[in-house]
Amino acid sequence: MKRLYKLIIISFLGPFVLTFFIVLFLLLMQFLWRYIDELVGKGLSFNIIAELMAYASASLVPMALPLAVLLSSLMTFGNMGEYYELTAMKASGISLQQIMLPVFIIDIFIAIGAFFFANNVMPYTNLKMKSLLYDVRQQRPELQIREGEFYNGIDNYSIRVNKKHPITNVLYDVKIYDHSQRRGNVSVTVADSGKMEITSDKRNLLITLWHGRSYTELEVERRKRNNTFPHRTDIFDEQKVLITLTGFGLQRTDENLFKNYYQMLNVTQLTRATDSLKDEMERTNKQFHRALLNYNYFKGVEVLKRRANQRMQFLPHDTSQVHPPKQKKIVNNFDSLFNAYSTDIQKRILSMAISNARSTMSFVENSAANIKYEIRNLRRHEIEWHKKFTLAAACLIFLFIGAPLGAIIRKGGLGMPAVISTVFFILYYIISLTGEKIVREGIVPSFQGMWMASVILIITGIFLTYKATNDSSMLNIDTYLSFIRKFLGIDRNTMLERKIYLSGKFQFSEITHNELRSMLQALSAEAALCKQAIKEKHRGGKIIKQFFSTGKDSSFENLSQMYEKFFEQIVISQWFTIKFIRDRLQEFPVLETFERFRLPARSVYRLPVIFFFPLILGYLALYIIVVHKTIKRLSQIQEKSSYLFESLEHPSVLIDFVS
């Protein structure tokens, strides 16, 4: 067993290391394509790009490990199944679970390493990567002045070049608009040609211009009337302009600004942050309810005292205008109390009520937005906490999917295993994203949403392990192809292969020469009549009528019964010992009924097909194909029967074919 386990471990570790780096490279390329627009054209040095790729690679390791486990286990057990090593092990009394045991132990260490990496290394790499990526995003793109376009990438300057020399980089017909004075286009420089170069410290842009002019509007007192707008024109043969570049160099941001972000925390820090957020939410809710009751729904005692004097001004000066009802009516009927005041006072009361309602609504909306933000922030921390464990658990789950699948499909290499692994990983990724989304939306608790994909794949792994233990052929593609061919009426088997089991009978039935010739003649004639009848019924628009009909074709039923009886009799007769006849019988096709491809007779099946027009067209096309296939096979039966009948007319020839 030790040598066997050593062989299995070596067979697993090789593909695991290979697939891990392949998967990591593919994920890194996906990251690069995602941020390619933010990296290109900013003059980043190789060290900066290499540092960013290194941090990105480290952050992708926990995601690459489960896929590597799935792919390598598929390849390992697929290779052993393809070369019958699994068959030999099972024949020796070793179960599939025992064969998986050494790989399972290795996978436990991989899962522990994945958790350690996600908990300790990923927060550090995420902090480095996010801060560096933020700095790269803030950096301005490199100077790229195009012909015939205004370039506004430099602060306070707008540059236009009509033409650029592709080799010397000399610029022709240069226009520079200086907006540094914040007064519009008051300073313009025009030159026939020029050249740009950045200083060695990368902080200044030196522009050398030849044969041009500078136009500058002079600032005068705007209060004077009849302003003449004086300006100055400078003519030069050579002029140098020094422009300070700001924002073109990579400025590194303090990483402490990002260290409290949820992706930069480990399990302990996430737990502490989650508890703090829950306490903060509880405190916020209490403050909201207290403020809503005391200052919006019900005014507090202090508020009533403070506003008592203000309410006195609402009372009418002429007390004769007031007709207050009795105390009992005032308490029970607020309308009568409101109607006791004059129209002006009622308007002021309504205006104050509307103002209070609007302020209350604004207070509720702002508080709800703050509470919603706190809840979303809490869910993000909970999602990140669960991710530390789900990625490690995925390493174990994918083993119980990849190993049984490899034992079932029995295909090694990178072909079929890579396809199946990709399908399962995409399925896992989609379910994980769905669970994460419904957790963020608050539809389900964080535990249910984040572990939903793991539970589904655990059930799938148990099912596949059970099937692989019982040597199931559920993923044998020939099984499904045989079913599809049979359903479409294109079965590759012949009629003799279906009836060959009858040839094992001990006694032969007696069929004379004339009886055999009569059977062949009758079969050929019946096949011709049936073929003609089917053609006649499906000619032109009649095929639509046959497609919707529910009755059976009597001529086809008679031929099918005759065809079955003919083979059942001849296979157990002495004629089957003649090699020539056996070879000819091998050419007779299987005759499947085309009536089962008509529109279903029951209304519960017929109505959905009728209402969905594209579906009924596809079903009709399938029916036409099967009808033509049936006609072709009837022609083959007629031809083969006639040929065998003619051969039997010369008994002397048959002597040469007796085996």
Image (tube, rainbow, N blue to C red):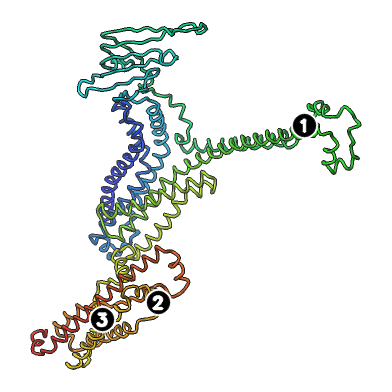
User: How far from the left and from the top, in percent, is residue 103?
Assistant: 32, 52
In the displayed structure, 208 sits above or below 433; it is above
User: How far from the left and from the top, in percent, is residue 647?
Assistant: 13, 86
User: How far from the left and from the top, in percent, is residue 9?
Assistant: 28, 51
Badge 1 element: helix
Residue at the (37%, 50%) spot, across then down: 425
Which label belongs to residue 407? none
Which label belongs to residue 348? 1
Between the residue at mark 1 and the residue at mark 3, the CA separation in whole angstroms equals 101 Å
Circles 2, 3 touching at the beta carbon (< 8 Å): no
Circles 1, 2 touching at the beta carbon (< 8 Å): no
Identify the mark nearer the N-term, 1 or 2.
Answer: 1
Which is in the foreground here, disc 1 or disc 3? 1
Residue ID for mark 2: 549
In the displayed structure, 135 sits above or below 189; it is below
Which is in the foreground here, disc 2 or disc 3? 2
| Camera-side residue of 499 and 554 | 554
Identify the mark nearer the N-term, 1 or 3.
Answer: 1
Between the residue at mark 2 and the residue at mark 3, the CA separation in whole angstroms equals 32 Å
Residue at the (16%, 79%) spot, across then down: 583
Crowd rating for badge 2 (residues with CA inside 10 Å; few <14, some 14–19, many 20+): some
Quadrant of the snapshot with the N terminus: bottom left
Residue ID for mark 3: 499
Badge 2 element: loop
Badge 3 element: helix
Circles 1, 3 touching at the beta carbon (< 8 Å): no
